[in-house]
Image: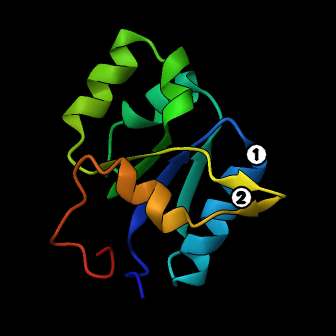
Amino acid sequence: MLPKTLRILIADANQQLRLSVEKLINHAGCYGVGVVATADELKALLGFPGRPFDVVLVNCRLLDQASTDTLDLLQQHSNVVLYRNGLYSGHMADPHSAIREGLCGLPSAVPGLH
């Protein structure tokens, strides 16, 4: 189970996939989830002053439209997970393997993420 205070940001242009990932996280007991649909929204939230997100989940396809500034902000964040699309017949197809393929720096100190 994930800590309830964990703040997670999901960046994905596909609304159905965004909701599927959010439901998985909610089911694990974490409700501090933010969602964005564009690279500009991702940039705005990553650059927002205050408490940073503990984990940022980004669909690789969203990075195609990302500016250099957005990519720089992602590189400064230490807990970014890139994942590929994983929808087949309207259901998420093994999200764990899709996420494992693109790990960029999961925090070992955050319980419940490994």
Q: Is residue 91 above or below residue 55?
A: below
Where residue 76 sits in the image (x, y, percent)?
20, 33
The answer to whether mark 1 and mark 2 are in CB contact below 8 A is yes
Q: Which quadrant would the C terminus be assigned to in this image?
A: bottom left
Residue 15, disc: 1
Name the residue located 35 percent from the left edge and 14 percent from the top edge.
Answer: 69
- Circle 2 — which element? helix
Residue 39 lies, with reference to residue 21, above or below; the image says above
Q: Give left or right: position of 9 versus 13.
A: left
- Residue drawn at (47%, 42%), measured in percent from left and top? 58
Under mark 2, the amino acid is Leu
Please provide percent x and percent y for residue 21.
61, 61
Q: Amino acid at mark 1?
A: Gln
Q: Is residue 53 left or right of residue 76?
A: right
Compared to residue 43, the image places residue 93 above or below, namely below
Which label is found at residue 40?
Answer: none
Q: Which residue is mark 2?
A: 19
56 in relation to 89, above or below: above
Quadrant showing the N terminus: bottom left
How far is disc 1 from disc 2 in space, using C-alphas?
6 Å
Q: What color scheme is it?
A: rainbow
What residue is shown at x 76% (from left), y 45% (from top)?
15
Viewer-nearest residue: 66 or 54: 66
Question: Which residue is at the far right?
Answer: 89
